[in-house]
Amino acid sequence: MKKILIIYPHFPPSNLAGVHRARLFAQHLPSFGWEPTILTVHEKYYEEKLDFNLKKLLPVDLRIEKVNAFSVKKFRLIGDIGLRGFFQLYKKAKQLLKNENYDFLYIPIPSFYCALLGRMLNASTLIKYGIDYIDPWVHTFPGSNKLFSRHWFSTKLAQFLEPIAIKNVSLITGVAEGYYQPVLERNPHLKNIITGAMPYGGEVKDHEIIQSLNIKPYLFQKKENKLQLVYAGAMLPKAYKPLEKIFEAIVVNKSLFDNVEFYFIGTGKIANDAESYNIKPLAEKHGLWNDIVFEYPARIPYLDVLVHLNIADGVFILGSTEPHYTPSKVYQAILSGKSLFAILHSQSSAVKVIRNANAGVVIDFNGEKELEKIKNIFVDNFIQYRQFLSIFKKEQVNAILFLEFSAYEVTKKLASLIDLNVAT
């Protein structure tokens, strides 16, 4: 069996979303002839709240190597775990690559600084390496053009470091093609490189284990006289304008939503801060807070999210004015046996998937220029969704269309790309 070293500084019991990328790859890679080793930072150096239930999702025979990192307990000059553990990760990775017969090195990012490890380890050991874009590295944030601001500095640093990290890269993958396509355009020498887009992928076993753990919902309880929809996860930066149009439509037709509740979970500005609201100010502005709209800003454990999906009546999916949304959340929603009410960019691959699979109702719009369309047709589409929900059975969903978004199939694609890379 070929051997792959995956460097990702966060891993269970970290509760950050990115850990599931490395976790699910590691779970399924052996099925395709690859034996994974995870190289990560020891959890005692993590700042986020730990979720030890996540360790129950790991393969029992998965090899995990942990290194120390610089602490932030006394002086928090640097928060990024990839930077705090950078030299320790490099030292351990170099040792593993030199002493054992690894065939490939794979580095999901962020932490973006870890991408530099690929270039350094390639120089010292000649190992081929790949970088996986969970998020874009060079990205324009609000305020990025404000001279010497934090976002301006971050953008300039990313523009400087990324070309260094990818100089000798052999494989580039990402959650969506849009996350890495600009990288190829900025770096013409990569035009013939092997690439591939793969969403996170859903895992059936994650939903099955909930029963054995006996986790109870605690953010909200099931109400028989209410239609409860859940949005779980961080808000996309350009999702707020579509959301405001939704709220505007609800206000004009508020009587139609008297028995509807939207729950936003884990949407806060700061992952572990229960008071770092993102949705609340917008809901208060439109008079919907604690009536129709509720927010629990802090990130809660992954399996706890699945529990709350299970008691909800449906799942609310909100994309953005950018077309890069991928169906990861969609697949998790279907695995929880729920129907979807979605607002997505017309170019999102999730639009076609949801409709063809008969999994819910979708409002699609063409970015910034069609924001008013959302407001104009929201109510009619929501009425249609309520009718859909009244007869929905999870057995009616065309599960075959979702197979390509399962963690198994996503990993199969990754393995094929690595095989092709190693063979060349």
Image: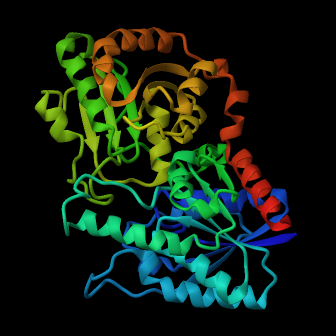
Color scheme of the displayed model:
rainbow
Rendered location of residue 423, percent (x, y)? 86, 65
| Quadrant of the snapshot with the C terminus | bottom right
| Quadrant of the snapshot with the N terminus | bottom right
Up-down relation of residue 96 to residue 280 (above or below): below
Rendered location of residue 31, percent (x, y)? 82, 56
- Tell me if I can see residue 319 in this picture: yes
Q: Nearer the viewer, residue 228 or 120?
A: 120
Q: How many numbered dots are placed on residues in this image?
A: 0
Image position of 82 (left or right of 288): right
Tell me the residue at 22%/48% (across/down). Answer: 277
Image position of 274 (left or right of 228): left
Tell me the residue at 19%/33% (across/down). Answer: 290
Rendered location of residue 203, percent (x, y)? 64, 46
Image position of 305 (left or right of 173): left
Q: Nearer the viewer, residue 160 or 300?
A: 160
Q: Quadrant of residue 54?
A: bottom right
Tell me the residue at 22%/53% (across/down). Answer: 276
- Tell me if I can see residue 176 in this picture: no
Q: Nearer the viewer, residue 413 or 149?
A: 149
Up-down relation of residue 395 to residue 379 (above or below): below
Tell me the residue at 37%/48% (across/down). Answer: 234
Q: Nearer the viewer, residue 214 or 282?
A: 282
